[in-house]
Image: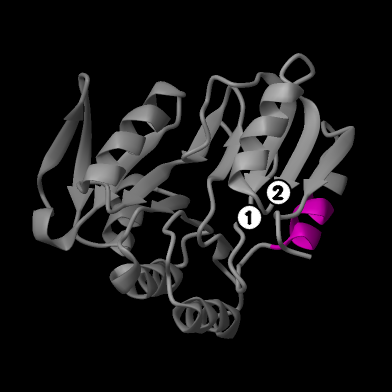
Amino acid sequence: MAIFLNKDSKVIVQGMTGATGMKHTKLMLGDGTNIVGGVNPRKAGTSVDFDGTEVPVFGSVAEAMEKTGADVSVLFVPPAFAKAAVVEAIDAEIPLAVVITEGIAVHDSAAFWAYAKSKGNKTRIIGPNCPGLITPGQSNAGIIPGDITKPGRIGLVSKSGTLTYQMMYELRDIGFSSAVGIGGDPVIGTTHIDALAAFEADPDTDLIVMIGEIGGD
């Protein structure tokens, strides 16, 4: 078991064709993530080769979901365009949007958080300014290194990206069911409480590590 992400998750990458998106898509594929497409309206209809794996590019999140059955989007979109990208994911009603982007204006984050709520919270937002989440041995949606830990029965939820990696490494011999980096911005989607509730309901998570942010409260 896991929370929010597992081996059956079908992942798309908004901003996949940018430098950061390309780099981390390749790493996620290497971790076994089932990446079924990218989104870039200007490159729709093309595909990108990642060491022999052809990943198609779609014009919109809705199109990608229709063609692939995607249920997770990872966003590597520059801050100025991130709000529009998240709103697009919410309008398409993708179940999970993982917003990696750092430096999004707080007003923009508040706006898309409120928009998701107004639409019935059909899209769970993780982030922004977060490392994403990983279910070791199954799937990795974000920028968490996939080789620093193994599957196990610890759940991890953290505001700090760096401390996420540190804790996963320190407890690597025990292993994790899932690890979720929720991000350190003032306005975020999924909170500590949301993640704790999900871990509590997961029969394969025996204990939870919860981490704040250095300089936070």
Question: How far across and down, in percent of the image, does residue 61 sit?
Answer: 32, 60
Figure quadrant of the N terminus? top right
The magenta stretch is 191-198
Measured along the vertical axis of the image, is residue 53 above or below residue 162?
Answer: above
Q: Are marks 1 and 2 in contact (CB under 8 Å)?
A: yes
Q: Residues within 10 Å of mark 2 (few under 14, many from 20)?
A: many
- The residue that disc 2 covers is 158
> What main secondary structure does the magenta stretch of the protein show?
helix
Rendered view: 193 above or below 10: below
Q: Which amino acid, by three-letter code, is at mark 1?
A: Ile
Nearest to N terminus: mark 1 or mark 2? 2
Give how far across and how far down residue 11 sits, in percent. Answer: 42, 43
| Residue farthest to the front, as pictured | 215
The residue sitting at 33% across, 39% down in the picture is 36
Residue 1 visible in the displayed image:
no
Q: Residue at x 45, y 24 (%)?
A: 32
Residue that mark 1 sits on: 182
- Residue 161 appears anywhere in the view: yes
Residue that lies at the very extreme toward the top in this rendered image: 173
Quarter of the C terminus within the rendering: bottom right
Please state the horizontal and vertical placement of residue 112, each as a whole percent of the image.
48, 78
Please state which of residues 195 and 217 is positioned toward the viewer in this rendering: 217
| Local SS, label 1 | loop
Q: Position of residue 23 (x, y in %)?
A: 29, 35
In the figure, residue 185 lies in which quadrant? Answer: bottom right
Does the magenta-highlighted stretch encompass residue 197? yes
Give the quarter of the image for residue 156: top right
Label 2 SS: strand
